[in-house]
Image: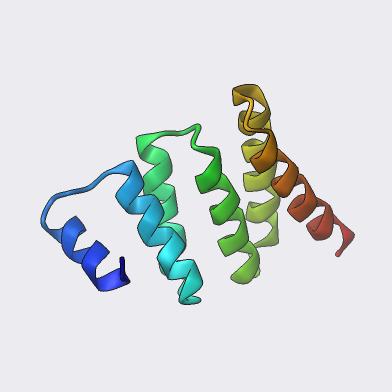
């Protein structure tokens, strides 16, 4: 689904975790990182333990050169993912975190 369709759904009151996550994901693909951050933060208001949102949020922070926020986001996301048994998300975020800490 494209960004405009997702925004229309949001305008029509269909706000949800999946809609916000999907919109954040689409915005990242379009390199609209600042707006993606807004929607991913909103997604985390729906579910503060949605590890996939942490992974994308960290990526958006890196792209906007907010490395400290990216590090905090990945660290929290890793902790949540490991606790919930989401091993793949945890592994990916550990790789991203390791790259950030090298800089």
Give the side of residue 101 with respect to residue 88, left or right.
right
Q: Residue furthest left?
A: 12
- For the rendered model, the colour scheme is rainbow
At x 38%, y 56%, the residue is 22
Q: Does the image show residue 40?
A: yes
At x 49%, y 37%, the residue is 50
- Report the front residue among 3 and 46: 3
Q: Position of residue 63 (x, y in %)?
A: 62, 70
- Report the front residue among 92 and 73: 92
Q: Does the image show residue 33?
A: no
Q: Position of residue 92 (x, y in %)?
A: 71, 48
Give the side of residue 44 with respect to residue 89, left or right.
left
At x 26%, y 63%, the residue is 6
Give the side of residue 16 with respect to residue 75, left or right.
left
The image shows residue 73, relative to residue 70, as above or below, that is above
At x 65%, y 54%, the residue is 70
Q: Position of residue 49 (x, y in %)?
A: 50, 32
Give the side of residue 97 with respect to residue 2, left or right.
right
- Please identify the quarter of the rendering in which residue 27 is found: bottom left
The image shows residue 6, relative to residue 72, as above or below, that is below
- Report the front residue among 26 and 43: 26
Quadrant location, the C terminus: bottom right
């Amino acid at each position: 689904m494209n960004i405009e369709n997702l925004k229309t759904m949001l305008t029509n009151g269909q706000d949800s975790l999946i809609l916000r996550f999907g919109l954040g994901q689409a915005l990242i693909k379009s390199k609209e990182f600042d707006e993606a951050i807004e929607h991913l933060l909103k997604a985390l208001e729906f579910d503060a333990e949605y590890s996939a949102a942490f992974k994308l949020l960290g990526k958006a922070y890196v792209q906007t050169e907010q490395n400290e926020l990216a590090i905090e986001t990945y660290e929290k996301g890793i902790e949540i993912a490991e606790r919930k048994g989401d091993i793949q998300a945890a592994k990916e975020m550990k790789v991203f975190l390791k790259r950030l800490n090298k800089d």
